């Protein structure tokens, strides 16, 4: 199986897992909005923002270190076991320390975000999940570094959010709304951890007799720390609009904004799926000095990301009101924010592969500088726009931020590596998207009278079908035809 097919197969599974997880998180937001209201949803968003930023600090960049150092020990099981054991042990102590700090300071954190007792309890309860989530992610990255990303995707992107949704519904019926908001998050993390843990040794080829007694390895730690800074800043950027809305407004306003951000995030999931598979490929090609092939993979993946992201962008841009009304009639006022956030997500999706390319080609410091500058810009934009425009200001700030960041990364990759994401074949998804959007306006008026969630669901089917037909009429690229033939051959052998 050649590299394109391998990337497509891995990214296909990743995308499927991310899609399942995103749908489960979308449904979770829908359930909380419908059953508990915007204030409870805002409380959840603020608490999860705090905890996920804390998780990045607990991870300390060691997840990236595993992807870099474990493949080098693929032929040495003793070294591989010592390396993974050392990384997990370091992260375990860090995650426990950060969990205890959040427990101690949950009250001032909640007060800083204009939250009350419920937000304080949510931060305290969600913090209990940190050691389990960190361990699950590191186990998953260790297995990914050994060539098997599936356990990581299943545990972190599918099982965990599905369990969160299930336990929220269960606790809501059995114990009431407060219990449904507070307890399922940590419970889901614990179960996901115990699912992935026994799979580490057989998948990663570790030796149980070596154990977890590896000493702290300074080269690994020094490599990881810049990535921790980049990841910490990136996660802060991801949640900064939510947290600053909490600081400058209240949890109810955050509750209106969060569903729009979660919905637009479906576009970004396409990038995450491909970037996870692309990172070790870029690292391998760079180490071998095969930058021309790295550029070809970069252009190919950027085109695939754009191709898969456009149908969702069309839906959110053409019918933002009906999409947001799925969460409840009061959420329709967040429709303008959804349009702006969708534009930001598309920029992040298409140009975001550049960040992976820079990180995997020895430019960790530049990635850190990019992230730090972007964080400062985002703070400035939010301080200016949120007091004047509310949730639309936060969304506009995100759009301006990713526009600036996209241009910067594009110029950096071009100047440092001589690469760019553009190809002649990009016109096909763009033309297909334009044609689908144009055809959508010729639908009969009765189509727009479909009730509730039926309208956005039917619209997605119409847009997706017309988009696919136009793409086929424009003709598949050689890469796509090759992948389809390979998969047909594999399916034929399995049959």
Image: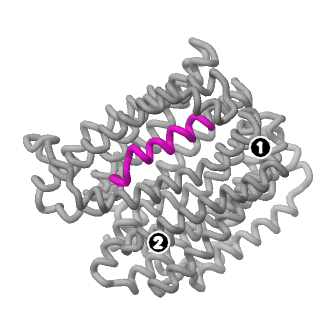
Which residue is the extreme one toward the top?
Answer: 175
Q: Identify the residue at image location x=25%, y=57%.
A: 146
Q: Foreground: 337 or 113?
A: 113
Side of 243 where 482 appears, left or right: left
Judge the density around disc 1: few (<14), some (14-19), many (≥20) Cα neighbours within 10 Å: many
Camera-nearest residue between 299 and 429: 299
Q: Is residue 41 above or below residue 350?
A: above
Left or right, residue 163 beside residue 7:
right
Secondary structure of the magenta portion, mostly?
Answer: helix
The residue under label 1 is: 324
Q: How many marks?
A: 2
Magenta residues, start to end: 46-63
**Mark 2 nearby-residue class (10 Å; few <14, some 14–19, many ≥20):** some
Q: Quadrant of residue 188?
A: top left
Identity of the residue drawn at 79% across and 55% down: 385
Q: Which mark is residue 366?
A: 2
Image position of 142 with respect to 417: above or below: above
Question: In x, y percent, where is residue 344?
Answer: 68, 61
Indicate the secondary structure of the residue bearing disc 1. helix
- Camera sees residue 320: no
Would you identify the image quadrant in which residue 440 lies? bottom right
Vertical order, 380 against 30 (above or below): below
- In this rendering, the label closer to the viewer, 1 or 2: 2
Disc 2 on helix, strand or loop? helix
Of the image marks 1 and 2, the number of the one nearer the N terminus? 1
């Amino acid at each position: 199986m050649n590299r394109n097919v391998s990337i497509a197969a891995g990214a296909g599974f990743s995308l499927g897992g991310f899609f399942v997880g995103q749908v489960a998180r979308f449904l979770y937001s829908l359930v909380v909005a419908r059953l508990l209201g915007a204030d409870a949803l805002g409380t959840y968003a603020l608490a999860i923002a705090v905890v996920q930023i804390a998780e990045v600090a607990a991870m300390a960049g060691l997840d990236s270190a595993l992807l870099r150092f474990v493949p080098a020990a693929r032929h040495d099981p003793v070294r591989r076991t010592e390396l993974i054991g050392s990384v997990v042990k370091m992260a375990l102590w860090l995650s426990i320390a950060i969990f205890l700090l959040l427990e101690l300071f949950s009250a001032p954190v909640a007060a800083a975000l204009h939250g009350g007792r419920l937000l304080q309890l949510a931060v305290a309860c969600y913090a209990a999940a940190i050691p389990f989530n960190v361990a699950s992610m590191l186990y998953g990255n260790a297995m990914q570094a050994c060539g098997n990303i599936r356990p990581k995707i299943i545990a972190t992107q599918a099982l965990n959010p599905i369990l969160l949704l299930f336990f929220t519904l269960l606790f809501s019926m059995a114990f009431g709304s407060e219990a449904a908001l507070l307890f399922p998050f940590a419970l889901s993390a614990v179960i996901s951890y115990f699912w992935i843990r026994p799979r580490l040794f057989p998948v990663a080829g570790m030796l149980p007799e070596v154990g977890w007694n590896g000493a702290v390895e300074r080269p690994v730690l020094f490599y990881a720390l810049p990535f921790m800074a980049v990841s910490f800043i990136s996660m802060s950027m991801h949640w900064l609009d939510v947290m600053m809305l909490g600081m400058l407004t209240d949890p109810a306003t955050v509750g209106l904004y969060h569903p729009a951000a979660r919905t637009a995030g479906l576009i970004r999931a396409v990038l995450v799926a491909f970037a996870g598979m692309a990172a070790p490929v870029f690292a391998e090609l760079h180490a071998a000095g095969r930058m021309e092939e790295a550029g070809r993979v970069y252009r190919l993946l950027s085109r695939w990301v754009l191709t898969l992201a456009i149908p969702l962008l069309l839906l959110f841009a053409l019918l933002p009101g009906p999409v947001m009304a799925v969460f409840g009639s009061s959420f329709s006022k967040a429709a303008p924010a959804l349009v702006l956030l969708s534009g930001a997500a598309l920029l992040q999706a298409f140009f975001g592969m550049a960040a992976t390319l820079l990180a995997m080609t020895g430019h960790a410091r530049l990635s850190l500088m990019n992230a730090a500058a972007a964080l400062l810009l985002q703070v400035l934009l939010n301080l200016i726009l949120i007091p004047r425009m509310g949730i639309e200001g936060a969304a506009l700030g995100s759009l301006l931020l990713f526009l600036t960041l996209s241009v910067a990364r594009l110029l950096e990759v071009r100047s440092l590596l001589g690469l760019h994401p553009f190809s002649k074949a990009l016109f096909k998804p763009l033309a297909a998207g334009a044609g689908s959007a144009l055809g959508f306006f010729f639908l009969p008026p009765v189509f727009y009278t479909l009730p509730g969630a039926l309208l956005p669901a039917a619209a997605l089917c119409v847009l997706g079908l017309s988009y696919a037909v136009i793409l086929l009429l424009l003709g598949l690229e050689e890469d796509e035809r090759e992948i389809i033939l390979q998969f047909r051959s594999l399916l034929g052998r399995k049959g």
